[in-house]
Amino acid sequence: MKKNIFSTIITLIAMLAVPVKSTLAAETDSISQKAQQFLEQQYQKTAPMARTVVRVSPLAPTLDKRRCNGPISFIHAPGRATRITAKAICNQPVWTIFISATIEQWQPVVVSSRALSKGTILGDSDIYLKEYDTKSLSSAYFTNPGELIGREVKRSLASNQIISPTLVEKRLLIRKGDLVYIEARKGAMTVRMTGTAEQDGSLGEQISVINSRSGKQVYGYVKSQGVVSVNGQ
């Protein structure tokens, strides 16, 4: 009987010891470890789709394990800089430590798959995605290849070059006042009518057109040169 009671007590002590041990382990996190966790959370909010890498500069051991009798708070506002400084603040006892770190945010960026000459109309085979640390890029970039399909290259591009908005422009397939075909599909049948474009349009854009026969305004998507589809892209 005494043996059973003793075994039960030992089991209870073992069960209770688990959360206590976890709590103590969590409290032994260094200031630099806590700073890294804080910075990762802050920068992941600014670019949820990016792979965020935070490298905190080592602190002197006496600073990294500095005692605080309450929660340590961190202050830093994410920006475009790759090298940053954050503040660790304790209220009891009162102290402040400045922590340096480097930030990288890697994500797929649209680049040219080959050398492209001025005037090229971009298609699927002309572009692909390559991962870059976007915090180190000085110019704007595209992350969605679909945004570039049908755009015209404004000046020659080298192979594997990041395509920025200044390097391409939308190619107008329809201009305001153009006589266009309004195309409507019903089952296997396609009906074409003529109309006048009320605005400019590039591939896939929705524009308004005046039906020549009825005089009514209709909306359709630019399908090709001089053709607007009312059934969608």
Image (cartoon, rainbow, N blue to C red):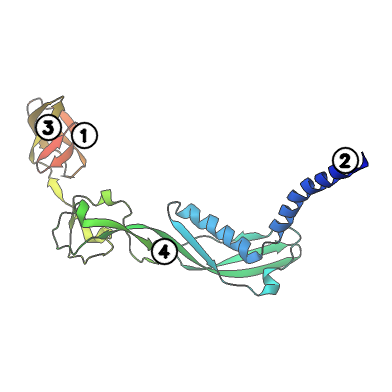
Marks 3/1: CA–CA distance: 10 Å
Gap between marks 4 and 1 measured at Cα? 37 Å
Give the residue at x 20% y 56%.
126
Q: Compare marks 4 and 1 and give the one earlier in the sequence.
A: 4
| Callout 3: SS | strand
Residue 232 numbered mark, or none:
1
Residue identifier under label 4: 135
Counting residues from the start of the chain, the first of labels 3 and 1 encountered is: 3
Q: Give the Cα distance between marks 3 and 4.
A: 45 Å
Rendered view: 146 above or below 231: below
Crowd class of label 2 (few under 14; some 14 to 19; many from 20; radius 10 Å): few
| Residue contact between numbered discs 4 and 1, judged by CB atoms under 8 Å | no
Residue 110 image point, x, y percent: 29, 57
Q: Which mark is residue 4?
A: 2
- Of residue 61 and residue 147, the one placed in the foreground of this image is 61
Characterize the local packing of mark 4: few (<14), some (14-19) or many (20 or more) Cα atoms within 10 angstroms.
Answer: some
Residue in the picture at 50% in, 57% down = 43
Question: Which amino acid type is shown beneath numbered disc 3?
Answer: Glu
Tell whether 60 sits left or right of 211: right
Q: Disc 1 on helix, strand or loop?
A: loop
Instruction: Indicate which label's residue lies in the foreground, 2 or 4.
Output: 2
User: Split into 4 quadrants, where in the image is the C terminus?
Assistant: top left
Q: Which mark is residue 40?
A: none
Q: Earlier in the sequence, mark 3 or mark 2?
A: 2
Q: Foreground: 121 or 195?
A: 121
Give the answer, above or below, for where 15 lies relative to 105.
above
Residue drawn at (27%, 56%) of the image: 128
Residue 168: image location, x then y, percent = 21, 58
Chain-order first, disc 2 or disc 1: 2
Q: Give the residue pinned by disc 3.
A: 183
